[in-house]
Amino acid sequence: MGLVEVEILGVESEDFPIWIECRLTEFDGSEHRIIEKLSVLTEQELNTDKLPTTLQIQCTVLSIEQENVLIDLSIPHGIQSTEGVQKFVVHSSLYHAT
């Protein structure tokens, strides 16, 4: 397990549960949107006055090669991008081992 850093762009729905929009940037610079319940991504409170901000979410590491890390967001919480993508290659600076 590990953590990958994403950027919280905003709140999609303030109804309970709160849904937020995040951006995950891959190693090649491509960007993916993730819209998910705040409670799935973190236990922290969200201060909407400080958006955009970063957040570290849980992921499973599939491989590490020099400066890039192949991660899977579907494990452990079933997270995926708005395009249905679950596996991403991110820069090692965005990955944090746990």
Image: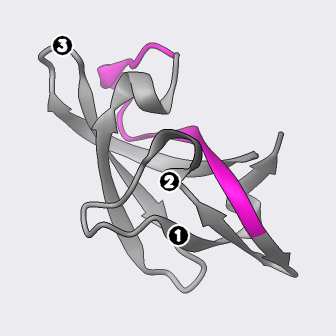
**Among numbered discs 1 and 3, the one appearing first in the sequence:** 3
Give the amino acid type for the residue marked by disc 1 in the picture.
Answer: Lys
Residues packed near mark 2 inside 10 Å, few (<14), some (14 to 19) or many (20 plus): some
Q: Is residue 63 left or right of residue 51?
A: right
Say which of 53 and 14 sits in front.
14
Q: Secondary structure at mark 3?
A: loop
Q: Are marks 1 and 3 in contact (CB under 8 Å)?
A: no
Q: Is residue 33 left or right of residue 67?
A: left
Q: Residue at x 50, y 53 (%)?
A: 74
Task: Residue 23: name its quadrant.
Answer: bottom left
Residue at which label 3 appears: 16
Residue at which label 1 appears: 87
Task: Residue 93: name its quadrant.
Answer: bottom right
Label 2 – label 1 distance at C-alpha? 8 Å
Q: Secondary structure at mark 1?
A: strand
Give the amino acid type for the residue marked by disc 2 in the picture.
Answer: Ser
Residues packed near mark 1 inside 10 Å, few (<14), some (14 to 19) or many (20 plus): some
Say which of 41 and 77 sits in front.
77
Q: Is residue 51 magenta?
A: yes
Question: In the displayed structure, would residue 62 be above or below residue 52?
Answer: below
The image shows residue 98 at horizontal and vertical percentages of 83, 39
Residue at which label 2 appears: 74
Q: Is residue 60 magenta?
A: yes
Q: Are marks 2 and 1 in contact (CB under 8 Å)?
A: yes
Say which of 78 and 12 sits in front.
78
The image shows residue 24 at horizontal and vertical percentages of 46, 60
Q: Residue at x 52, y 17 (%)?
A: 43
Label 1 – label 3 distance at C-alpha? 28 Å
